[in-house]
Image (cartoon, rainbow, N blue to C red):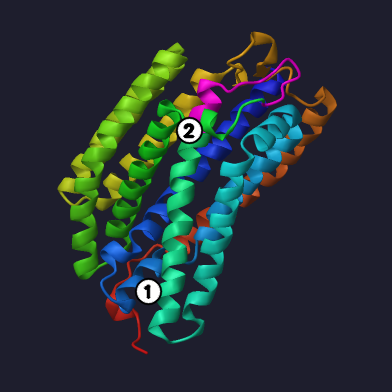
Amino acid sequence: MDLTTIWFLLVAVLFTGYFILEGFDFGVGMLLPVLGRDDRERRVLINTIGPVWDGNEVWLITAGGAMFAAFPEWYATLFSGFYLPLLLILLALIARGVAFEYRHKRPEASWKRRWDAAIVVGSLLPAILWGVVFANILRGVPLDADHEYVGGLLDLLNPYALLGGATTLALFLTHGAVFLALKTSGDIRERAGALAVRLGAGAAVLAVAFLTWTLSIRSSAAAVVLAVGAAAALLGGLAAARVRREGWAFAGTAVAIGLAVATLFAALFPNVLPSTLDAAGTLTATNAASTPYTLKIMTWVAVIFTPIVLAYQGWTYWVFRKRIGVANIPQH
């Protein structure tokens, strides 16, 4: 296996980890006004992700850095052609992060409502737009022979991409509800578990439709196997959620999201950004890659530091593994 293939796989792994971990963050943020009936309950919801949300975003930073260094042509074309949706994602993530930090700074209800709205919107926009972005990456976009994007915003808002956005939205909502059922106690846990089952039914329909459409556009034997595995994991997770086995339910939705993202990358390879105009404009893992020497240096850096980062993040989840409830939140 050559280094370009290895780094394509590493980028895929980083985005897969990001969607699994940040997916439940987004879900919790979007469900804040749904499951949080008062300020103490909303504080419970926020505290379930408080120790980990910023660490989860490191996966995105690392994925973007790996793409920039290993596949600079892919990075440049993607961030220029998809400038508006990626900018909106960035602004939403900034607003959400600021809201987490500032929400508790003042006691007024109006102050908290404004930051709660920022959390909801800051979670909703990325949940939809990441699906739109990755659906367009797989489907292909208008690129000229110089690998420059020559389309407009409406080219990105095609039916397949909009279905991708609806699918990621539904999956993240379900994933977040399952996570809350796993991490909370009392009435919030019961409501989150019941909501996860209802949301999961819609997410399953959308996911099957999206993956089926995906395989009709681009496919491989590996992609078919991964797509079937994603559907099976989601159904298994929903079955576990129905009988209140939250740990197994969370594992099921996490595996389903991971395999769904892996399906996209497996169907995409060896391309990284297909052109809908001319095959000569298609970016592949080969023509978008850095020099072999750059990839070699990056590989050694990844081998040394990746285990350290994974160990630290795993330790964080272990430390903050216990459930929390309203009883753990003091009244102000």
Name the residue located 61 percent from the left edge and 27 percent from the top edge. 151
The residue positioned 41% from the left and 31% from the top of the image is 260
Which structural element holds mark 2?
A: loop
**Would you say residue 41 sits in the magenta stretch?**
no
Q: Would you say the residues marked 1 and 2 are in contact, meaning their CB atoms lie under 8 Å apart?
A: no
Left or right of residue 330: residue 98: right
Please state which amino acid type lies under the numbered disc 2. Leu
Question: Hey, which quadrant is residue 332 in on the image?
Answer: bottom left
Is residue 159 shown left or right of residue 299? left
Asked if residue 294 can be seen in this view, the reply is yes
Residue underneath mark 2: 157
The magenta stretch is: 134-149
Tell me which amino acid carries mark 1.
Arg
Confirm whether residue 255 shows in the render.
Answer: no
Q: Note whether 292 is above or below 13 in the view shown.
A: above
Whole-percent x and y of residue 66?
A: 69, 38
